[in-house]
Image (cartoon, rainbow, N blue to C red):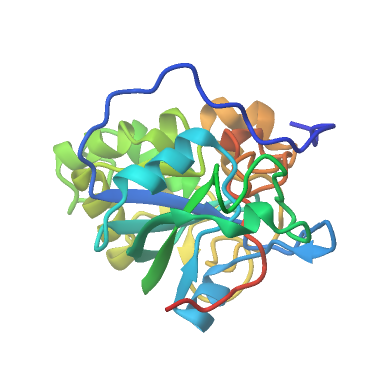
Amino acid sequence: MPPRSSSKPEPAPASSEPAVEYRHWLMKAEPDSRIEKGKDVKFSIEDFEAIATTQWDGVRNHEAKKIMKERMKVGDKVLFYHSNCKVPGIAGIAEVAREGYPDYTAWDKSHPYYDPKSSADSPTWYMVDVKLLTRLPHFVPLKALQAVGSSSAGEAPAYLTPDQIAAIRGMALLNRGRLSVQPVGEKAFEAVRMLGERGGWEGLGAGAGTNKGAGAGSSKGKGKGKTEGEEEGEKKAEGKKRARGDGEVKAADAEEEGGLRRSRRKRKTG
């Protein structure tokens, strides 16, 4: 959807869904340069590799904030997802290195996602630290996941079980992709990890490829198009850049329910 006239943080939801014990997550970031209030919010797999561990600041969506503040635990595994780009998809695997703590960038007036309602005494937003574990040999595009999820056991890679295919089909990414920080079931996580490590599914989705360098299907995520708006329900909002309402992609990524706009500070943590 087009950039919103206001970059105000999303209001807190009236109710919250019951917490389920997840130990795997998916977190989105923009791999292509985009200047927001004078700062580049780009954060690609290459940037992640360069610093190894980063604070996940800039999230301005209450549901995603709640996940980081209350549900993520040290050691939880994370699918690192390239969003708001020409070929959105999963580029690497990371893990939570520090549990939720106040996102101090919210009260930094120079930060792209400054929130005057948040303060050190009464913080509204929280973040976690995330450590990259590995860059997947095969970049796994969103379209490939959609193809696997909608295929029969005979069409998907032979190494995936029917349960794993069903798990991919049920992923929040394919059914409610806008949120920039979202839970992933263990079977779905393992299935995606296998796709990224073993490949062999390239014919199922457009934009498939290895995780080397720029270009379609690469983990570099060149081309800022849509972020996961390519998912079914997001195709509408997709061609329009979203500002990961959460603080990530420009409000242009309505797909993000708030998005996850990462600041380019690429600050090494701990």
> What residue is drawn where x is 67% and y is 26%?
236
Looking at the image, the residue that sits furthest to the top is 14
Relative horizontal placement of residue 109, taking residue 27 as reference (left or right): right
> What residue is drawn where x is 33% and y is 43%?
70
The percent coordinates of residue 181 (x first, y second) are 45, 45
Q: Quadrant of the N terminus?
A: top right
The percent coordinates of residue 68 (x first, y second) are 40, 48
The percent coordinates of residue 216 (x first, y second) are 61, 61
In front of the other: 76 or 108: 108
> What residue is drawn where x is 60% and y is 53%?
58
Q: Quadrant of residue 73?
A: bottom left
Q: Quadrant of residue 75?
A: bottom left
> What residue is drawn where x is 35% and y is 31%?
150
Q: Quadrant of residue 139?
A: bottom left
Looking at the image, the residue that sits furthest to the bottom is 50
The percent coordinates of residue 117 (x first, y second) are 67, 39
Whether 16 is drawn above or below 225: the answer is above
Relative horizontal placement of residue 149, taking residue 212 as reference (left or right): left
Q: Is residue 85 visible?
A: no
Q: How many marks overall?
A: 0
Q: Quadrant of the C terminus?
A: bottom left
Q: Is residue 97 visible?
A: yes
Whether 141 is drawn above or below 61: the answer is below
Whether 126 is drawn above or below 154: the answer is below
